[in-house]
């Protein structure tokens, strides 16, 4: 691919284009910049080094198979333990469990290969079943655990998770020979990396290797869990995810046919694939969709790339591997995946029988089509609806960056390695026109161009700070926003949502706020928020309807939250036929000055 290229575009009043820019460079944290300029001089020459993808002009009639393909999840069904293989080949009643065990745990922000960065902790056996043994860190008492946690751990592992992972991926080897899978509950997981990191659970592949010395291996088939966990659906998603990691580690370290360690992006992707719900991935998918160009897909080592627990990266691989699974629906994808002798892109190419550059292009094309489906009402009400509600978050597909060629003669986009950027090219002129697009890119870029047609069925959202919002000191307890939603005449705004963005925000900090506009029923308590919404006006302009709102957000939602990166507004639109679509808009965080609790002396004297 050359660094520079040019291609002509013809615009009519309803034409738009989506330019997909992929960065195929596989070096972690290597962001590239693409710059584009436009002029009116069009030479009669075909475009080169671009892939043009024609799609139907009637966007609402796009193939509905793309609507949920990247969000498919595998359902976990209960199964009696005696219908599946045991975790261990030995009989549980022949193995005596140690009442006390010692475990080594990496707890600092230092070098993983430095023994001094590990702590040795003592744990006591507090519960066991036919295939599970639960140990609790000695520094915590059993009565300090959440009510029902230990019982739920046993029940979910024995009745659902172990059998499901064994069937889909493969069995977990009994490394320590006691016939049971070990769970270590410890409060250390709330203060890892010297107290900077809190996680719910993890599996360490080295624990499954006999040839790795302590403290780098505990020589045990085990899972580390945060002792602050609570029972419920979120626990089931977590166990399904982490036990998949245990199966992958077990399979790839089996003696006699040891396989290379799974690259981190694939290890996380297959674990997400096994989750029955969205509690462990809804916020990650939302973060990736917010800024798809920012988050690499292919990362062999998250920790060394300084992308460990990066939500956008995890959302990317979740969607990608689910999409690959959907392309191989009848091939037992998960089992072939976990037992494959390769890892990385070589594995994916063999599993899908597609070179990675082409596979990546097809996936990014599917993502672009999803976004178009999310913000365009269908003319056929019988077609399946896209998945809008994903756990606690609202999905609207990957965000497009708009480039109006009539207003700006240039634009640019920064794209991370193995990431995709989406540019929506449009012209404000009503008369037909021809433009020449000039691209200054990079050797590893891949371009795909889609021509689409504007339709009254599309929905758009714009948000800005209210004109009353002043940078001066304020006594107001709220920040005010002005939202403008453009939507079909036969639809109306059903609800407004505010999400807080950030690649490393905790689930609690990311919790979206919501306000119903159409009061069909009182929202559940967990959905109530501090948002105050006033409908300003609604008017019809040509073939569209424009509805405006003033939204007040408590200033306390922003104060002291330096890890926030931006805000995302989303509006759900509902049509007369009960179809729902989503419009989204991202904006910068407010610059808040200190609030004054009272007027100054000079002001009071006036």
Image (cartoon, rainbow, N blue to C red):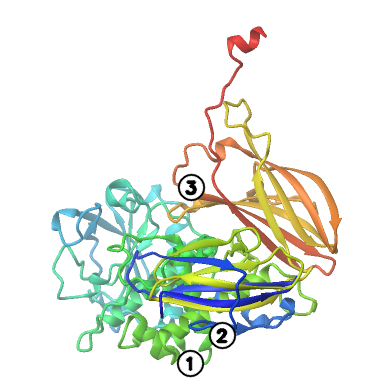
Relative to 407, is 437 above or below? below
Task: Indicate the quadrant containing the N terminus: top left, top right, bottom left or bottom right.
Answer: bottom left
Apparent side of residue 559 relative to residue 430 in the rendered image (left or right): left
Q: Position of residue 207 (x, y in %)?
A: 24, 70
Q: Position of residue 240 (x, y in %)?
A: 44, 71
Question: What is the C-alpha distance between the residues marked 2 and 3?
Answer: 45 Å
Within 10 Å of disc 2 (Cα), the crowding (few <14, some 14-19, many 20+) is few
Of helix, strand and loop, which one carries label 3? loop
Seen as rendered, the residue at the extreme top is 605
Which residue bears the numbered disc 2?
Answer: 46
Within 10 Å of disc 3 (Cα), the crowding (few <14, some 14-19, many 20+) is some
Q: Position of residue 206 (x, y in %)?
A: 23, 71
Residue 62 visible in image: yes
Nearest-to-viewer mark from 1 and 3: 3
Determine which of the numbered discs, if any, sits on residue 205 in the image: none
Within 10 Å of disc 1 (Cα), the crowding (few <14, some 14-19, many 20+) is few
Q: Residue at x 68, y 60 (%)?
A: 583
Q: Residue at x 62, y 76 (%)?
A: 9
Determine which of the numbered discs, if any, sits on residue 331 in the image: 1
357 or 121, nearer to the observer: 357
Task: Indicate the quadrant containing the C terminus: top left, top right, bottom left or bottom right.
Answer: top right
Residue 274 visible in image: no
Question: What is the C-alpha distance between the residues marked 1 and 3?
Answer: 42 Å
Q: Which comes sooner in the sequence, label 2 or label 3? A: 2
Of helix, strand and loop, which one carries label 2? loop
Image mark count: 3
Q: Residue at x 47, y 53 (%)?
A: 502
Which residue bears the numbered disc 3?
Answer: 564
Q: Quadrant of residue 112?
A: bottom left
């Amino acid at each position: 691919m050359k660094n520079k290229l040019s291609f002509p575009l013809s615009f009519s009043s309803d034409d738009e284009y989506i330019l997909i820019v992929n960065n195929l460079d596989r070096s972690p944290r290597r962001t590239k910049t693409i710059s584009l300029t436009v002029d009116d001089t069009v030479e009669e020459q075909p475009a080169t080094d671009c892939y043009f993808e024609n799609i139907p002009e009637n966007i609402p009639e796009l193939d509905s198979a793309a609507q949920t393909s990247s969000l498919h999840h595998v359902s976990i069904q209960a199964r009696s333990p005696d219908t599946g293989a045991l975790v261990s080949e030995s009989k549980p009643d022949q193995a005596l469990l140690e009442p006390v065990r010692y475990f080594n745990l990496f707890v600092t922000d230092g070098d993983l290969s430095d023994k001094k960065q590990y702590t040795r902790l003592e744990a006591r056996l507090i519960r066991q079943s036919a295939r599970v043994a639960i140990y609790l860190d000695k520094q915590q008492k059993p009565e300090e655990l959440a009510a029902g946690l230990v019982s739920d751990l046993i029940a979910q592992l024995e009745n659902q998770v172990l059998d499901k992972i064994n069937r889909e991926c493969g069995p977990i080897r009994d490394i320590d020979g006691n016939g049971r899978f070990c769970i270590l509950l410890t409060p250390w997981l709330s203060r890892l990396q010297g107290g900077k990191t809190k996680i719910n659970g993890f599996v360490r592949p080295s624990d499954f290797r006999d040839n790795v010395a302590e403290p780098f291996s505990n020589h045990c088939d085990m899972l580390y869990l945060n002792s602050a966990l609570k029972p419920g659906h979120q626990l089931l998603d977590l166990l399904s995810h982490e036990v998949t990691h245990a199966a992958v580690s077990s399979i790839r370290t089996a003696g006699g046919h040891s396989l290379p360690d799974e690259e981190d992006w694939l290890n996380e992707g297959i674990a997400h694939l096994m989750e029955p719900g969205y509690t462990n991935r809804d916020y990650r998918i939302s973060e990736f969709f917010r800024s798809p160009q920012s988050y690499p897909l292919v990362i062999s080592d998250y920790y060394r790339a300084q992308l460990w627990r990066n939500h956008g990266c995890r959302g990317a691989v979740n969607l990608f591997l689910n999409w690959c699974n959907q392309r191989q629906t009848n091939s037992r994808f998960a089992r072939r995946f976990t037992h494959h002798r390769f890892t990385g892109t070589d594995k994916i190419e063999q599993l899908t029988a597609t070179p990675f550059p082409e596979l990546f292009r097809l996936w990014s094309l599917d993502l672009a089509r999803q976004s178009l489906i999310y913000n365009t009402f269908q003319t056929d009400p019988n077609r399946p609806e896209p998945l809008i509600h994903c756990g606690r978050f609202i999905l609207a597909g990957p965000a497009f960056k708009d480039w109006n060629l009539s207003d700006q003669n240039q634009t640019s986009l920064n794209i991370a390695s193995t990431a995709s950027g989406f540019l929506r090219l449009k012209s404000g002129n009503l008369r037909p026109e021809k433009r020449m697009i000039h691209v200054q890119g990079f050797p590893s870029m891949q371009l795909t161009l889609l021509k689409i047609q504007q339709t009254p069925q599309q929905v758009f959202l714009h948000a800005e700070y209210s004109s009353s919002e002043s940078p001066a000191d304020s006594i107001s307890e709220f920040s005010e926003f002005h939202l403008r939603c453009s939507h079909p005449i036969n639809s109306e705004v059903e609800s407004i949502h505010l999400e807080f963005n950030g690649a490393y925000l905790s689930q609690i900090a990311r919790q979206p706020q919501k306000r119903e506009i159409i009061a069909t029923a009182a929202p559940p308590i967990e959905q109530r928020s501090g948002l105050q919404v006033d409908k300003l006006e609604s008017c019809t302009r040509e073939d569209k309807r424009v509805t405006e709102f003033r939204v007040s957000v408590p200033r306390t939602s922003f104060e002291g939250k330096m890890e926030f990166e931006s805000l995302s507004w989303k509006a759900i639109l509902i049509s007369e036929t009960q179809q729902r679509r989503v419009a989204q808009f991202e904006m910068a965080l407010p610059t808040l000055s200190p609030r004054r609790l009272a007027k100054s002396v000079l002001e009071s004297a006036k």
